[in-house]
Image (tube, helix red, strand yellow):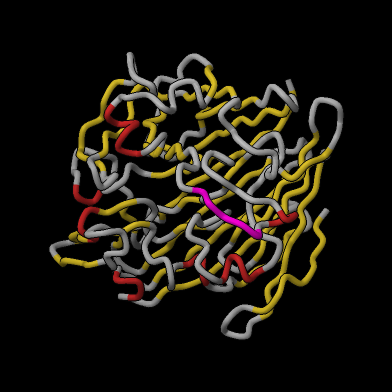
Amino acid sequence: MITTSPFGTAPDGSPVTCYAISAHGITVRVMDFGATILGVDAPDASGAIADVVLGYDSLDGYADANPSCYGATIAPSANRIRNGHLVIDGTEWQLVKNEGENNLHTDFDHGLHKRVWAAEIDEDANAVRMTTTLAHGELNLPGERTFTAEFSVSPTGTFRLYYRCESDRRTFANMTNHVYFNLAGHDAGTIRDHVVSIDASRFAVIDAGSVSTGELRDVAGTPLDFRTPKALGAEIDSDYEQIQLAHGYDHCMCIDGFWPCGRMRHALRAEDPASGRTLDIFITAPGAHLYSGNFLDNEHVKDDATYTTNSGFAFEPEYYPDCPNIPAFPQCYCGPGFPYESTIEYRFGTI
């Protein structure tokens, strides 16, 4: 079932709509401004419903700075590009330097998370399909591009997010969603007690600017080893240099079993012992960025809550950061006849 409601007016004067997609006790709310996830209502072990996604009550929070990118679709380029520089078919392209000398998430002010997407409802699929376009050279990348974000909830309650980019010439595309979860409820405080397992034998090492160095390091013997379930907070204050550099977890995990054909595989399981809620995430991308909300510091969020450090965690499926400049990494160029595609599944349950 899909219902709609107004969600304010965008800075350009366009009306913004919230779409509530429900099935099997799960309700997902998304809006066409930024193809953004606004909330997910899920039951706990006793059947009590809570919104487990961090965010704002009104459009203002998302249309203004939204430095944490709550629920946002990030595209064309997710995560960090060293010096904001990449080369495509011999031509140099320069993204804005919006994090020191580097680029993060394409463009904070003009990225796809700051515009209204065209939306259509597919009742048969219980889905909302959103599209937007970029002209050749817009956001400093080549190609006349069409981006698609399709949100759906299956009869069994699986929340699926499908991303696609089509281009009339070879271009770079690395899309993700920056949704934050707190399975105890978005306003319940810390996620340090969440018990997490991640199907990753390696992670992408970062430098002092949080940019990939090109090294993929074994997780064994490090705080980034989540192959056996452990609390997120168990080693988040470790003196391990990678934890110190990021002030917690802010690393791309190399999810085992990647195939370029887009094989869906399990990536993460999180459990909240207090509420009994669980979340399993399945992805097709090579990796997923684990971020433990190290710099969250937001007042006046939804339900008069205040988010602080570790109030939520993000797990952003992606190609490895700075992959255009590291040829050994899996690459995500697309063009005529070979679109970019990525699928994410969020499956909620209880212990």
At horizontal 53% and vertical 73% (from top left) the residue drawn is 115
Above or below residue 243? Residue 299 is below
Q: Residue at x 18, y 43 (%)?
A: 327
**Residue 221 located left or right of residue 158:** left
- Residue 286 position, x and y percent, is 39, 37
Q: Nearer the viewer, residue 92 or 262?
A: 92
Say which of 24 and 30 sits in front.
30
Coordinates of residue 192 in the picture (x, y in percent): 56, 29
Looking at the image, can residue 286 be seen? no
Residue occupying the point 45% across, 17% down? 227
- Residue 40 point in image, percent of width and height: 71, 46
**Is residue 161 one of those drawn in magenta?**
no
Q: Quadrant of the C terminus?
A: top right
Give the quadrant of residue 181: top right
Quadrant position of residue 335: bottom left
* Location of residue 30 in the rendering, given as x and y in whole percent from the top left corner: 67, 58
Residue 99, compared with residue 211, is above or below; it is: below
Q: Main secondary structure of the magenta part?
A: loop
Please indicate whether residue 9 sits to the left or right of residue 198 in the image: right
Number of numbered discs on residues: 0
Stretch in magenta: 296-300
Q: Is residue 30 visible?
A: yes
Residue at x 55% of width, y 24% of height: 196
Say which quarter of the image contains residue 154.
Answer: top right
The residue positioned farthest toward the right in the image shown: 47
Which residue of the protein is positioned furthest toward the left in this rendering?
90
Residue 328 or 37: which is nearer the viewer?
37
